[in-house]
Amino acid sequence: MSEAPALTVYFDGSCPLCQREIALYRRLPESARLAWVDVSSGLPPEQLGAGLNCQAAMARFHVRNAQGELFSGAAAFSLMWRQFPGWRWLGWLSAWPPMSWLFEGAYRAFLPLRPWMQRRARRLLGSS
């Protein structure tokens, strides 16, 4: 029986910003312990697991730990960052209240700007 990944990372592969950020993490050696799931392809709900559907996964960043617990937003980034030695400090800082509240507030402020930033990135990068 194979071991569950340390984390399953759900990301929007159709987003040029997300593509670049996820590519940065996937170049790290420790990324091999994580499962990377592009939710932009419209996966069936059973492939996403309990408590997550494609619409929610496209709207907000999610990770699932090896115990099956689902995390989103800044908490999800915090868990992911703790998997990588060079990012671990940021993962622990962003998990510590009151910093966790600030990180989540910043993430929520970013979400309404994301569609505009995606359009700009597509134009600048020449992607469709």
Image: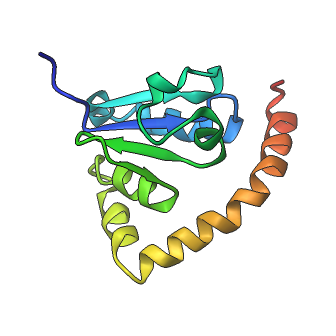
Quarter of the image for residue 68 reads top left
Q: Residue lying farthest left?
A: 1
Q: Quadrant of the C terminus?
A: top right
Taking depth in this image into account, of 4 and 18 the one nearest to the observer is: 4
Q: On the image, which quarter does residue 1 sit in?
A: top left
Using the image, determine if residue 100 lies above or below residue 121.
below
Q: Is residue 99 left or right of residue 113?
A: left
Residue placed farthest to the top in the image? 1
Residue 44 point in image, percent of width and height: 55, 20
Would you say 85 lies left or right of 43 here? left
Residue at image point 40% right, 69% down: 94
Viewer-proximal residue among 73 and 90: 73
- The answer to whether residue 3 is left or right of residue 71 is left
How far across and how far down the image is residue 60, in percent?
Answer: 60, 49
Q: In the image, 113: left or right of 56?
A: right
Residue in view at x 29 percent, y 32 percent? 29
Q: Position of residue 19 (x, y in %)?
A: 61, 33
The residue located at (37%, 80%) in the rendering is 97
Residue 31 rendering spot, x and y as whole percentages: 33, 33
The structure residue drawn at horizontal position 79% and vertical position 32%, both measured from the top left corner, is 125
Count how many numbered circles sit on residues in the image.
0
Q: Is the residue 91 above or below the residue 59 in the image?
A: below
Q: Is residue 51 above or below residue 112?
A: above
- When the figure is inspected, residue 109 is found, relative to residue 126, above or below; the finding is below
How was the colour assigned to the protein in this rendering? rainbow
